[in-house]
Amino acid sequence: MSRYTILLGGELVRTPALDRQIAGTRFIAADSGIRHAETLGIVPELWVGDFDSAPPDLPDHLASVPTQKFPADKDSTDGELAVDIALEQGATALVLAGAFGGARADHAFLHLALALRLAEAGTEVLLTSGTQEGRPLLHRKTTVFDYSDGTLFSILGFSELTGLTVHGAKWPLEAVRVPFGSSLTMSNEVRGRLGVGLEQGRALLVAHPLTSKEG
C-alpha cells in the first residue's frame, strides 16, 4: 500500500495519534499547508499550488522544497491538485491533514465531499485536524472503529441514508432511514466497540477522539 499525507490549509494540532497515522507516509503540501510541515517535523517531497496563500519567511529547509506551480485561474483547488498528484504517483491511501477549519469553509466542505468520492473509487481516506477525524462510510459495508468509550462522534449525511445501523454507541440505531439534513445522527458517544453499517447513501463519520472521558 502506498500511503500519502496531503498537508492542507485548515487547522492542525500535532497529537500522538496523528504521529502514528502519518508515520511512514510520503508528504505533499498544498499551498498554505506547507506551514504544517514545521509542526509535524517533516519535509514534504513536493509543494504544489498557485501559492497565493504561501506563508512568508519559511525556514530554508522548507523554502527549498521542490514546487509545482499552477495558475491562479484554475478549475481545481490546490488541495485537489495535490491529491491528484499523489494518486498519479500510485497512492492507495491518503491522510488529508488540515482538512477541517481554517479561513475557508468552502474548502473544508470540499475536503469532506472529495473524501467521499475518493473512498467510493477505492482509495482509503482519513481526514484529520489532529483533534477531530473524518472517515467515509461506504454503503453495503459495516465499518468498525477503534475509539475509546465516551468519544464524541457524528454521522454527516450527504444524501438521504437508508439502512443505517450503529452499534457500540450511547444511542444505537438499527437499519433506520435518515432524511437528508436530519440531525438524528449528531453528537453520539462511543460505548464499547463502535460499528456503523449503511445500506444506501453517502455519509461520513466525524469523531473527536480527544473528547474521550478517558482523556
Image: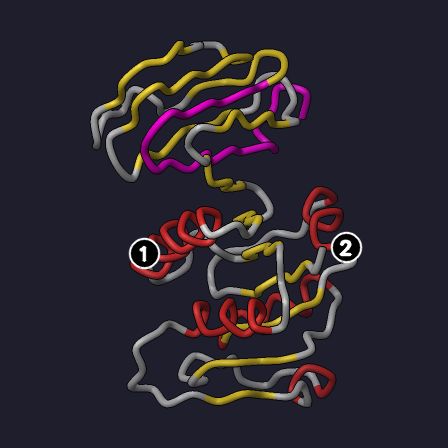
Instruction: Identify which residue is drawn at 35% across, 61% down.
Output: 107
Image vertical order of residue 195 relative to residue 158, above or below: above
Quick check: is 145 in the magenta stretch? no
Find disc 2 in the rendering and name its residue: 23
Image vertical order of residue 19 relative to residue 44, above or below: above
Q: Quadrant of the C terminus?
A: top right
Amino acid type indicated by mark 1: Ala
Q: Nearer the viewer, mark 2 or mark 1?
A: 2
Graded by Cα atoms within 10 Å as few (under 14), some (14 to 19) or many (20 or more), the crowding at tag 2 reads: few
Q: Quadrant of residue 51?
A: bottom left
Residue 135: give x, y in percent of width and height.
51, 40
Q: CA distance from mark 2 to mark 1?
A: 28 Å
**Which mark identifies residue 105?**
1
Q: Quadrant of residue 2?
A: bottom right
Amino acid type indicated by mark 2: Ala
Q: Is residue 166 left or right of residue 158?
A: right
Q: Quadrant of the N terminus?
A: bottom right
Q: Which residues are magenta?
A: 194-215
